[in-house]
Amino acid sequence: MCTANGGRRGTVVACQREIAEETGLHIVPGGGDPPAPAPVLPAGTQGPGQGRRGGVVRGSRLRDPQGRPHGRPIHLASIHLCSHDPAGRATEAQRLTTLGDHGRSAFFAGDTNSFVHRPQCEIQPFPDWAEIADSVYFRQRTIRIGDEHVPDTEPDRILAGIGPNGRSVFTELGHFAATELGQTEALQPTATLWRTDQGPPQRIDRFYSTDDIADALISVTTLVNDDVREASDHAPVVAKFSLPRLRHNLGLAA
């Protein structure tokens, strides 16, 4: 566990650097307004690009026993969708669909600043807006449909909603772990851990992938303890995969 100090934001950045040093990962400068803490992405990739938010690594490959890149490339991204503009989040989600275009394999994760589009499957219900003290949060996390304000679920619907052909662009891995692997704990809330003005915690930090990556999923776990709450109001979320199955699905023999 990272033990860095220096205020919540300073602690997050320091912890990420400590984790990078311990695990051999590297830091890609984050984007956003204001700039978010730098995401940690795999080392040995082919030059991350820097978009408006988060970082993107295009064409990262698993390696064979000799350490040579092999198999179908995975397009990776660390995301942080717009915190204040639902229309902006929808545009960013549409842009993310390009990661899975032309049959590409993709995996990305981060803070979506929005809700899931299948609330009936969740542990935590949507906020009761009449009970929310933070009026700005209400404006930033809802969209207007007719005369009613409803929770913004559009990014998740764009990324993981079932289309007319019965398929989605990506699989949302928390939902997949809960419904396909029987792990309801994968639906644990991830954010608003210590704030009291935005209602109960919500699951807004999520993983998405193409089906070949999702097929190798073992578990999704949200880590919440006093150390996490001291560092951030967001919890780390860990996805665990079967490496042999992942290698097989990406065309690299086990």
Image (cartoon, helix red, strand yellow):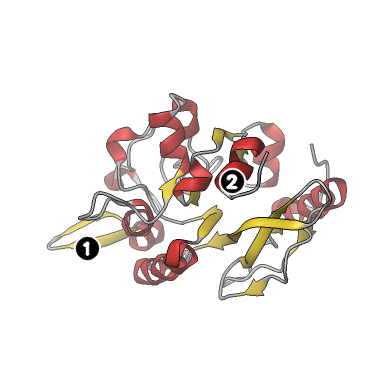
Q: Is residue 64 above or below residue 52?
A: above
Residue 158 in percent (x, y) is at 34, 59
Q: Which residue is at the front of the view, 138 or 240?
A: 240
Residue 132 in percent (x, y) is at 36, 47
Q: Residue 109 carries which label?
A: none
Q: Is residue 75 left or right of residue 117?
A: right
Quick one: which residue is furthest to the left in this view?
A: 146
Separation of marks 1 and 2 at Cα, in angstroms = 27 Å
Q: Report the residue at 56% width, 75% height from top.
A: 52
Residue 212 in percent (x, y) is at 49, 47
Q: Quick one: SS at disc 1?
A: strand
Q: Residue 144 carries which label?
A: 1
Residue 32 in percent (x, y) is at 58, 71
- Mark 2 Cα-neighbour bin, 10 Å: few <14, some 14–19, many ≥20: some
Q: Is residue 253 left or right of residue 95?
A: right
Quick one: which residue is furthest to the front in this view?
A: 253
Q: Mark 2 points at which residue?
A: 233
Quadrant of the rendering where the C terminus is positioned: top right
Q: Report the residue at 42% width, 47% height from top.
A: 171
Residue 194 image-quadrant placement: top right
Q: Report the residue at 34% width, 70% height from top.
A: 87
Does residue 112 show up?
yes
Q: In this view, does 34 lie to the left or right of 181?
A: right
Q: Report the residue at 36% width, 47% height from top.
A: 116
- Mark 1 Cα-neighbour bin, 10 Å: few <14, some 14–19, many ≥20: few
Q: Quick one: SS at disc 2?
A: loop
- Mark 1 and mark 2 lie on one chain; the one further toward the N terminus is 1
Q: Do the CB atoms of the residues marked 1 and 2 lie less than 8 Å apart?
A: no
Q: Which residue is at the front of the view, 45 or 80?
A: 45
Residue 53 image-quadrant placement: bottom right
- Amino acid residing under circle 1: Arg
Q: Is residue 52 above or below residue 218?
A: below
